[in-house]
Structures are given as structure tokens and as C-alpha cells.
Amino acid sequence: MSESLTRQLKITKQAVRGKGVVVAQNCRAAEVGAAILRQGGNAIDAAVATGMAIGALEPWMSGIGGVGFMTIWSAKEGRAWTVDYGPISARKLDPATYKIVGPGPANPFAWPDILEQRNEVGYHSIAVPGMVAGLGKALERFGTMKWKDVLAPGVALAERGMELDWYMQVMIANGAKHLTKYPASKAAYLCDDGRVPANDWQGTVRHLKLGNLGETMRRLAEGGPREYYEGALARDIAADLQAGGSAISLDDLKNYEARIVEPLSFEHHGVTINVAGGLTAGPTLRRTIELAGAATKGTGAPDAAFFAAIAEGMHTAYDERLKTLGDKPTDTCTTHFCAADSEGNMVALTQTLMSLFGSNVMLPRTGITMNNGMLWFDPEPDRPNSIAPAKRPLCNICPVVVVKDGKPWFCIGASGGRRIVPAVAQLALMQIDRGLDVEAAFHQPRIDVSGVGPIRVNRDLPDAVKKAIAARLPIVEVGNQISPLGFANPSCIVRDPVTGELTGMNEIMSPWAGGAAQ
């Protein structure tokens, strides 16, 4: 959509409300989760069903070859937990595989160029995937339904294939350069001559078969989560990985375990913010809010002081993050969704293949599109986040559950690489410190601070806000883009403390994002 046209449009989006709600970057995935709630499942059941189905709906974002984190509020236990199913490098990985051959982009925080882009594309870029283990562990600990039942919608969608629409065509076009290098990927996503598949002018519904993914999902539903890591399916995955040159072995799969860990919890102006900690972006979120202090407080729409405080706090927090941990400013293809039920359970879940179509490798035997988790490691040696065997990398994931008066208030998160934390911080503080309802908050223009380069400000912000930020830090104005999005892609569900009604919202400029209610 052109800049001149978007200046003429006022795009709005309605919230979804109910006693149980799922919001996702793909509205059909949200409907999968809401259907589970209608069947009597809880928010964790719904989140697992959504997560396992979404790989057949937006396979460039996430899928069972990916990784992620979720923050859960367990109504039964009356507390928050984080499920960590992030990537791990192979035990026999040789860092020399990722030979530095050039200085990389001019950006001082970007990784140097690696031989054959091995950390970014292809079999060497794949890390041990954790998504199946993570969702399986969450269901076992916090869910109420059987694994086979929550996987049923995902099995059906994978067997049907991906419905081709304009947005999928855009994503395939953006990824075609690398997809064409791998036979199974090319066969699934491109025409025989390498062109992007297209619909006819009548809008006839067309589905693309995602290799053997349908059969794989059925095997996984029948065999349980450990089938992916220890069964015949694991042997097929390992065989394909090794045939392509990956260092990941069957033992790497067998040894993978997702972890249920304490979230990073901290207080802010009368609420408790629970977020994934450790090597996620949770510590950066906490530092940003700490640095912003009381300047974000007020009533109504955020003012210049609010945005200036966020800009300065985020700029400092990212500077500290980059100097001590290391990171890369790269566009990522991640998905975030939230689920909440009438019992008080809440889930904020972020999962990813990392880059667009991850490694771009679809495994021939299984139809699984694999992550490129090795891109999250710093290829320079002797640094905190350097490439090494059996190691977890730093990431930007930031799923949050906010608790007020001992009860879950809202869950929130986003996709968008480094843009995640600025979006989560602003939208959370608009509700906590400014008293905005979630629908109003999501319609507010935002800024983006990634610790590198000028502050990116939405062109619709008042001039006073732009001037206040520009007086402290360089800025650049950004339009309201649809593809690619100009800012992060957040989702949020809020519980009314009096009525218990749930209200869900998604990013306004994301045409696929939506919610569904019980």
C-alpha cells in the first residue's frame, strides 16, 4: 500500500470480547484456539492447539521446526511460570564451520559475513528445535485435554495444505531466492519454473501441499511429543539433517528437554510484571521500565514526556544489552499469540523460525520447515553470545503476564525482532500508567527504539512528541505500512477485574491478525 494512499485512510480494528479469548497474528489460528475453549479446554489447551496449527497457516513464521517461550498464569497454582523451549546448538558443532569472510554491514552491531551464509541459510543454520517439547510440557503440566485432541485441528490443516492468498504470495516472493535452493522447499512453495504461485482472477480457493507435513503431524499426534525426539519420526528428522550436512544428531534430539522455570518478576506502580527471563528480552524490558521511572505516569493518551522517557530508557537499555550480551538487528519472522479462559488462566506465547522461512530448508521426509537458530549466536569468538556447541543463544522474545491485586490482569507479547520490547513496553505502560483500555492503547501511534540508529517515530504522533524526542535523540518518521509492518506485531488480552470479561486486541496494521471468543 502506497504512502500517499495510507495518508488518506484511517485504519481501525475492533477488539474481540468473551469469557474465553484467543488472539493471534493469524485469525484462523485464533479460531482454532477458541474452538478448543468451546470444547471445554482451558487457555493452555487452546494455546497448544493454536501453536501446533499455526505452522500450516503461516509456515514462514513458525512451525514444529521452530522454538519459543511462553509465560503462563496458572489459576490452579495462583502464580506465573515460563516455559523455555528455545534453541540449542548441536553437541558436536564445530564453530570453525562459521568462518568469517568479511566485515559485514556497516552497522557496528551486525554480525560479520559468514562463509556461504552458513549461520543464516541452509542446514548449518539449524539449531535443535524445541517447539514440540515446549508445547508438550506445557500441556502436560497445565492443560486438561489429551495431546491427540489438541493436535487434531493442526493435523487437519496440515493435511489440507496452506490456503494461498495475497499475503502468502508476498511472503513467498520475499523468500524465493533461498527457497529455490532446497528441493522440498521449492516443490512446496514455488512453481516448477521457480515462479511464485498465483490465484486466478475468480478467486478460486487454492491450497499448497506442504510436503509431507500432514503425515508428520498425524504421526506426532498419535505418538506423542517425544515421538519428535526419540521415535521413528526423530530418526527421519535426524537422517534428513545429517544428509544435508547439519551437525544435529539423533542424540541431540533425544537429549532435548523443554524447561519450566521461574519467570523474571518485578514490581511497577502497583502491578507485578512477569516475563520470560534469562537470555530473552525480559531483562531489557525490566531495565527500560526501571529507567523510565515515574515519567510514564499520567491520564489518557501518552504525552511527550511518556514517549521521551520510553525513548531514553530503551536506548540506554539496548546499549547495555548490546555491550554485555550481543545481538543482531535483523528482521525476523516470529509469531505471537495470547489465550485466556474464564477460570483465570492466561498464556502469552511467542514462537519462531527466526528468519523468513527459517533456514529455508524443508526436510524431505517430514515436510518440516526448520529454524535458523544459529543466526542468534555471535560468530565472533570469545564473546558472551559466541557460537559454541550445546549452547543457548540470546533472543528478543518477550511474553508477559501482568498481575494486579494478586490476579492476572493482562497478557501481552509481540513479534518483530528488536521491535518487540519497545511495543510491549509502550502498550503495557499505556494501560498500567495511563489508564487506557486495550482497544484505545492499540490505536495509539508508537515509537521504535532498537539501540541502533535513530529513534523511529510514527508519523501520526503529535509534533510536540516528535520535538521532545528529537531534542534528546535523532529521529526518523515512519509511515503506517502493511507489508512489511513499520512496527512490531503485538497481541494482548485483558481481564476486567469486576466482570471477568476478556478483551483481546491485535496490531491494527496487520491484516491477518485477529481474535476469536469462546
Image (spheres, rainbow, N blue to C red):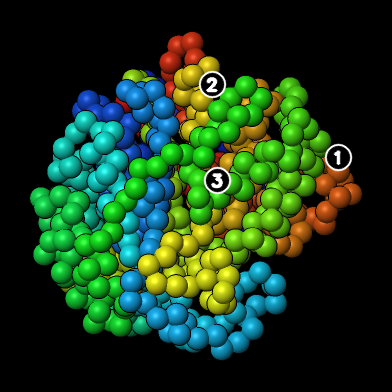
Can you tell which quarter of the image residue 163 is in? bottom left
Q: Quadrant of residue 44?
A: top left
Residue that carries the numbered disc 2 in the rendered image: 404
Give the Cα separation between the discs numbered 3 and 2.
Answer: 19 Å
| Pair 2/1: label in front | 2
Q: Are marks 3 and 1 in contact (CB under 8 Å)?
A: no
Q: Who is closer to the viewer here, 51 or 314?
A: 314
Left or right, 121 with respect to 193, comes to right
Mark 3, Cα crowd under 10 Å, few <14 / some 14-19 / many 20+, is: many
The label shown at residue 464 is: 1
Q: Describe the element under mark 2 as helix, strand or loop.
A: strand
Left/right placement of residue 280 relative to residue 162 reads right
- Numbered disc 3: secondary structure: helix
Residue at left 35%, top 43%? 260
Other residues around mark 2 within 10 Å, as few (<14) / some (14–19) / many (≥20) = some
Q: Which mark is residue 282?
A: 3
Q: Is residue 458 visible?
A: no
Res 259 visible: yes
Classed neighbour count for the residue bearing mark 1: other residues with Cα under 10 Å, few (<14), some (14–19), many (≥20): few
Name the residue rendered at 58%, 33% in the picture.
266
**Which residue extends farthest front?**
382
Q: Please state the horizontal and vertical placement of residue 248, each as a whole percent of the image.
A: 29, 73
Residue 439 drawn at (x, y percent): 57, 29
Residue 415 vs 229, above or below: the answer is above
Residue at 77% of width from left, 40% of height from top?
Answer: 309
Q: Are marks 3 and 2 in contact (CB under 8 Å)?
A: no
Q: Amino acid at mark 1?
A: Ala
Q: Determine the residue positioned at 40% across, 42% down.
A: 261
The mark nearer the N terminus, 2 or 1, is 2
Tell me the kind of residue under disc 2.
Answer: Lys
Q: In front here: 179 or 206?
A: 179
